[in-house]
Amino acid sequence: MKRFTGNFTQQEPISEDGIAAAVDVLRSGRIHRYNSLAGETSIVSALEAEYAAYQGAKFCLACASGGYAMSVCLRAAGLAPGAVVLTNAFTLAPVPGAIVSAGGRPVLVEITNDLVIDLDDLARKVDLTGARFLLLSNMRGHLANMERLQALIEKTGVTLIEDCAHTMGATWNGVKSGNFGLAGCFSTQTYKHMNSGEGGLITSNDPQFMARAIILSGSYMLYERHGAAPDKSVFDTVRLETPNMSGRMDNLRAAILRPQLASLEANIGRWNDRYRVIERTLKSIPQVHVPERPDEERYVGSSIQFCIPGISADAAQRFVAANFDRGVELKWFGADVPIAFTSNHHSWRYFEPQPMPVTDEVLSGLFDMRIPLTFTLEDCELIADVIADCVRNLCRGEP
Ligand SMILES: *Cc1c(COP(=O)(O)O)cnc(C)c1O
């Protein structure tokens, strides 16, 4: 019987040039982003300039985490206390957490079988609640029809902030994820597309918004030293009216991120090679639905999702256990208790419960798996074979 012995949470090591850059920062003792010598550009500022260029955005702010990035964006966008923020019901816990941390009230929107926000339900909820903000979570890297979404945003005047934790480097019709609304939020936490342990990036083309975000992030009055910031004059109107909510990135993290940014495009290719090997086998299993990847989308296959529609909770648990016994770690989003990183809207009891029948139906059969770059293509074939075996056993009623 085939068995996989690799580790689903093992990322690649930091490259030698990243390690060397980190050691240089440590030797200098100048770890704080504003602790630079006269005329020196800090490493965080250099990263901001490079990420803005990569993203094709005018401005970029590096900060403490992806969750922090989202809450700062909501504040900088002018979210009023108690105001509604729409978000898709299928997302990760930091998303509703960021809304609540910024003083907003999460209102959930249904998702489709292909795991993206349901644009019809979104239109309904905008009408129903009068919401002025959408924090769109491009959960697990799946992009909705972004032209339709943008048309809706423009028609209703809703402010769009994108959670691109899983879409760093992804595009829709050639436009980078994160460039569709007011701002894009990215995470450089270990399990995302660049790894600094913790970290976040915000991009935007709006000078007023970015000036507020920079002051909020804890820039003191040193905003002129930023790497991709609006003109100094923009800060005149906001600098004394915006609170400091410290959440900066430091030079050590930026030092290990810069070489990773240089290899991001190559890594996207490597992720997608692995994704396609697994997808090919999963698609050949009649009981399994693999979400459609539209031609408009350039995705980053750093994880894969599939549904077994109609599977019972009991069978889903047995299926996860059977895979686990053979070394394959699947997450199931239908569980009624939150496990590790995997929770669903039923466990977010700090805001009012909202019935999400369509999303619940999708989640009840939804399985999710990480694809770290430490896996070889042969590993991916083996993993897909194990999953296929377990589906066959499931259908035969075997454990
Ligand atoms: C990881 C993640 C974030 C941000 O996470 P941090 O741990 O705060 O950097 C946001 N949204 C999604 C969907 C995520 O998976």
Image (cartoon, grey):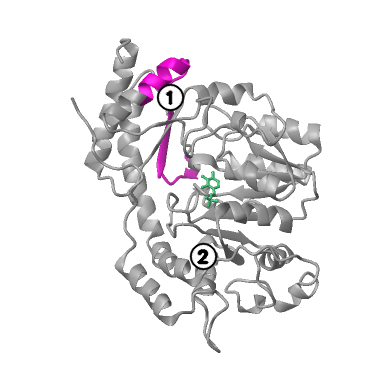
Quick one: which residue is furthest to the left in this view?
A: 1
Q: Position of residue 173 (x, y in %)?
A: 53, 47
> Which residue reaches farthest bottom?
38
| Residue at image coords 20%, 28% | 2
Spatial CA distance of label 1 from label 2 is: 35 Å
Label 1 sits on residue: 289
Instruction: Identify the residue under disc 2.
Output: 51
Q: Is mark 2 within 8 Å of ligand 1?
A: no
Q: Could you tell me which residue is drawn at 52 percent across and 85 percent down?
A: 40
Residue 102 in percent (x, y) is at 71, 50
Give the left or right position of residue 18, taking residue 249 as reference.
Answer: left
> Which residue range is magenta in the image?
295-320
Residue 253 image point, x, y percent: 46, 66
In this image, 282 relative to 345: left or right? left
**Above or below, comparing residue 50 to residue 104 in the picture:** below
Say whether residue 212 is visible: yes
Q: Quadrant of residue 64?
A: bottom right
